[in-house]
Amino acid sequence: MLSAIVGINWGDEGKGRMVDLLGGDYDVVVRYQGGNNAGHTVVNSRGKFILNLLPSGILRENTINVMGNGMVVDIEHLHGEMRRLTESGIIITPDNLKISDRAIICFPFHRRLDILEEERLGDKKYGSTKRGIAPVYSDKYMKKGIRTGDLLSPGTLREKITNLLEWKNLTIAGAYKSQPVGVAETLAWLDKFGSPLLPFICDTGEYLGCAAKTGRDILFEAQLGALRDIDMGIYPYTSSSNTLAAYAPIGAGVPGLKLDNTIGVMKAYSTSVGGGPLTAEMFGGEAELLRRVRYSGVEVWREDAGRGLFSADKT
């Protein structure tokens, strides 16, 4: 079975927990879009884990995890995320994690550009997470991106980086009047955080195609929610990728496959992380009370009418 789990709202619906819950029924879990601009929090018998780039199936010992070509990967962040999980006892090897050789690398200068543009916009900013997602997706569609597969060809990497930074510094140093990015420092960053990932990089489209042909069950994991989709969401206050289930086979590298099942995750009430308008948004004390509610017998917050404060009652 080929299934996709997507958020119906603006994200933060608890998709990671659903992937962790249902992932035991699947052989492979695939992230097919987005970067480290959002996270999935999973709490299970092994502890509490926050995953920004790694598929949520990484917490299951018998699950193969794939980072698809539709993703943009900050390899420095990924390096840290993998280290934190391994320190917590999670096993991560090329046998259970595969990174697409077509995924685009998100560089430190993408983060800089994100911050510089938000600062320039001031009160008109879009509410970016400042993780470089919009700038790196822009480079991808301008055919200026560096793929993870380029790390496997060091002989041509310097020339590609040199050409990229010659163009990129026209904006960073020219338009924003910021310090230009150097080739040496960028190559050093790539070597430090990219070299440990080399054994994980492969043609994930070929792997997933073979997995589907042999009847393996595949679960596609989305980041953010449908209303953040770049085409169908609340543009321009969206993410920079396609978060919908229909994009899953494309972002995973197997566009010829057809989903058998789509699972939508929604909240009892809508919330939105980031900037932009939210239809029928609540403000004031009642809205704050609603935000503080804790479910599943953990904590319920009530307002102290006399002091306007909140105190916790166990349920």
Image: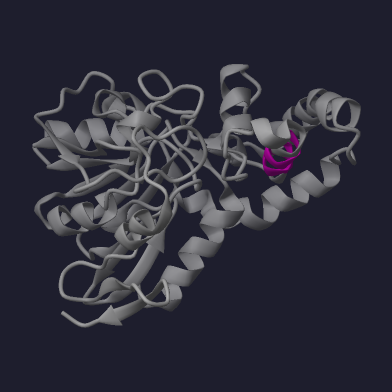
In which image quadrant can residue 133 be found?
top right
Please provide percent x and percent y for residue 150: 60, 35
In which image quadrant can residue 172 be found?
top right
Extreme-bottom residue of the structure: 314
- The foreground one among 191 and 17 is 17
- The dominant secondary structure in magenta is helix
Left or right: where 57 falls relative to 251: left
- Where 196 falls versus 299 (above or below)? above
The residue drawn where x is 28% and y is 72% is: 302
> Is 94 part of what is drawn in magenta?
no
The residue drawn where x is 27% and y is 69% is: 43
Please provide the residue range marked out in magenta: 109-117
Please provide percent x and percent y for residue 198: 53, 50
Extreme-front residue of the structure: 306
The residue drawn where x is 42% and y is 53% is: 284
Please provide percent x and percent y for residue 291: 34, 59
The residue drawn where x is 16% and y is 49% is: 27
Q: Quadrant of the C terminus?
A: bottom left
